[in-house]
Amino acid sequence: MPIHKISGLTVNVCGDVHLGRTFRTGVPLHRLGDREEMVWEEFEQQLNVEADLTIIMGDLFDKFVVPPEVVLRAYDLLTTAADNGREIIILRGNHDASRDSNKKSSFDLLRELTWKVDGILVAERAGYHRTGSTVFLFCGWSPDVSAHDDVSFLQENKWGEPVAAAFGHWDITQHGEDTHNLIPLDALANLGVGKVFTGHIHKADSFTRNGMEVHVVGSMQPYAHGEEPDGSMLYMTLTPEQAEDMLAGDEDVFADSNIRILLIDGAEYPHEFNCLSRTFKRTLSGVAKVDEEGNPVAAYDTFDLRTMISTTLTEFGISEALQSRINTTLTEKLSHA
Ligand SMILES: [Mn+2]
């Protein structure tokens, strides 16, 4: 449940939405577009959740630039929700801005569209916001200023109230030298913050670090194999035998699922079935390889550029933060090409 009670307020914390993401790999022809609609439907539901404050935790759009119809549809849903009395905060995510200030993103466009809309606030950098008598700190992602610097340059809030919680789009672990987007726990603690929420990481988690309560919200939905929570029906990885067993009970059992079949190299699985997507994960050895947590490893999940790049970067130990910057830069280059 994304609902949190903070200082007596009901706060709906909506994880990375990724509007405009396209799902094509392994999608049966007659199901094209269904997965995209599921994302829109849930986004609309999220905006309708009864709450004093609705916070979109960054990556509202999937890429630096998404099609205009995606921006307009998002604008329509957001303004309708605001008209219905929702107070909505949208954090800028790491897809949404470029170091080159001449380049403008779909997020920039949305910010311009919503500039004067009551009830919608776009957080491009770190700043305070008061709802009733409760003060929150919202930290949008910046391409120029590190998460740490952005928070440490802040004065105490002008109302002199304790900060009930901080919200950002941060990395929670440092890999290598890149600390640009690392969650600034010390700087937050210096401002008296005791509770933080972050988007960016697609798998939900909660823990206490340096005395700080950290909630990794998790994306609004899992968007790929490996992002799903335990027991998810939306994304499942199965052996051919498991898939056959389930299909024997109900041939439509996978109608609302993305199914990844584990195949040993050289094996085939010709059986088609109704599903959101059907992909294969091949392993090179005679047995399906799993890591220490029992997750299948190696081989590309799908044959798309993003997956291939991120798989390779991960293999070479490149940090998530640096990966996301490489991805952002590449995406920008491709979108501007
Ligand atoms: Mn994201």
Image (cartoon, rainbow, N blue to C red):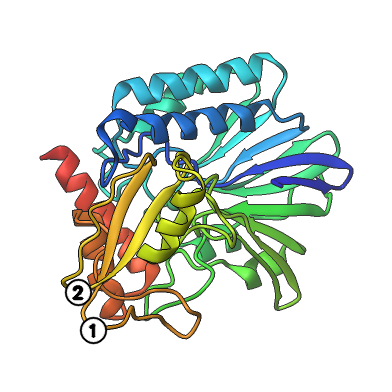
Where does label 1 land, which residue? 285
Name the spot of residue 6 as percent of width and height, x first: 82, 48
Contact, mark 1 vs mark 2 (Cβ under 8 Å): yes
SS of the residue at dot 2? loop
Of 289 and 319, the residue lying toward us:
289
For the view shown, which residue lies furthest in the right direction?
8
Where does label 2 land, which residue? 265
Name the spot of residue 15 as percent of width and height, x first: 57, 47
**Residue at 29% over, 41% down:** 27
Asked where in the image residue 48 lies, by quadrant, the reply is top right
The amino acid sitting under disc 1 is: Ser
**Residue at 32% over, 49% down:** 278
In which quadrant of the rendered image does the C terminus lie?
top left
63 sits to left or right of 81: left
Of 260 and 208, the residue lying toward us:
260
Name the spot of residue 185 as percent of width and height, x first: 63, 70
304 sits to left or right of 104: left
Give the spatial CA distance, label 1 vs label 2. 7 Å
Asked where in the image residue 81 lies, by quadrant, the reply is top right
